[in-house]
């Protein structure tokens, strides 16, 4: 009974929000914001807290540990989330550049022409360099280098996890996300 009532309420909301004859848009994006991060450095701290903060604000952030379940294919979930997101947040940390997945996600965001808000967590932009351990092809290295260079020259947010004010950081990051989403929405509606 309760499930039927919830379903009826959803249908009523759809009818109110989407009048008869209105053109239905394609599927909504999987997420509003894609959070790109190095799990070992930031998943239990800055990335997880930012995800939860954005979720409480009514946004749809994508964080691998929160949006994926055992059995999901990494590229099968992450790549479509990046392609459909409105905005990216890249959290750079000391071990970020050691991860193929981090660099792949960043490169895909840049290649998809996504606006990216960089967060420099315990690292300076000048310290970000792709390490060549002989595991990446020359093309991959160039792709990763291009993405890193582009983001190094993007205004971001710096945060020191030992000395920084976590609450102030979360509010500043959420404010930056909201302002960018509003700008993107305005740009899209004027097209």
Image: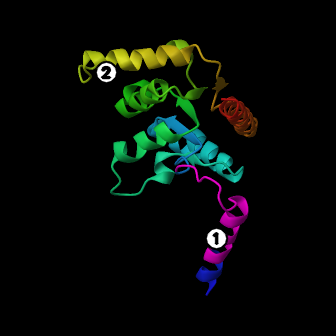
Which numbered marker is on residue 75? none
Q: Earlier in the sequence, mark 2 or mark 1?
A: 1
- Image quadrant containing the C terminus: top right
In the depicted view, which residue is nearer to us: 134 or 30? 30
Secondary structure type for disc 2: helix
Q: Kindly tell me whether residue 86 is visible in this rendering.
A: yes
Vertical position of residue 98 compared to residue 79: above or below: above
Residue that mark 2 sits on: 140
Magenta stretch: residue 17 in it? yes
In the depicted view, which residue is nearer to us: 23 or 10? 23
Q: Which residues are magenta?
A: 7-26
Vertical position of residue 16 compared to residue 159: above or below: below
Separation of residues labelled 2 and 1 (CA atoms): 47 Å
- Horizontal relation, residue 162 to residue 30: left or right: right
Which image quarter: residue 105?
top left
Which image quarter: residue 33?
top right
- Horizontal relation, residue 50 to residue 186: left or right: left
- Image quadrant containing the N terminus: bottom right
Number of marks:
2
């Amino acid at each position: 009974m309760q499930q039927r009532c919830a379903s009826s309420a959803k249908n009523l909301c759809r009818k109110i929000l989407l009048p008869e004859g209105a053109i239905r848009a394609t599927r909504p994006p999987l997420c509003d914001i894609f959070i790109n991060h190095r799990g070992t450095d930031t998943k239990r701290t800055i990335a997880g807290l930012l995800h939860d903060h954005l979720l409480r604000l009514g946004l749809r952030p994508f964080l691998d540990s929160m949006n994926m379940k055992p059995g999901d294919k990494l590229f099968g979930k992450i790549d479509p989330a990046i392609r459909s997101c409105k905005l990216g947040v890249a959290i750079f940390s000391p071990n970020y550049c050691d991860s193929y997945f981090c660099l792949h996600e960043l490169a895909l965001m840049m290649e998809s022409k996504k606006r990216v808000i960089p967060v420099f967590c315990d690292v300076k932009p000048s310290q970000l360099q792709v390490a060549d351990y002989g595991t990446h092809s020359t093309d991959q290295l160039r792709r990763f280098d291009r993405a890193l260079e582009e983001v190094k020259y993007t205004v971001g947010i710096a945060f020191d996890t030992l000395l920084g004010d976590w609450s102030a950081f979360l509010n500043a990051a959420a404010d930056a996300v909201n302002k960018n989403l509003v700008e993107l929405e305005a740009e899209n509606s004027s097209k």
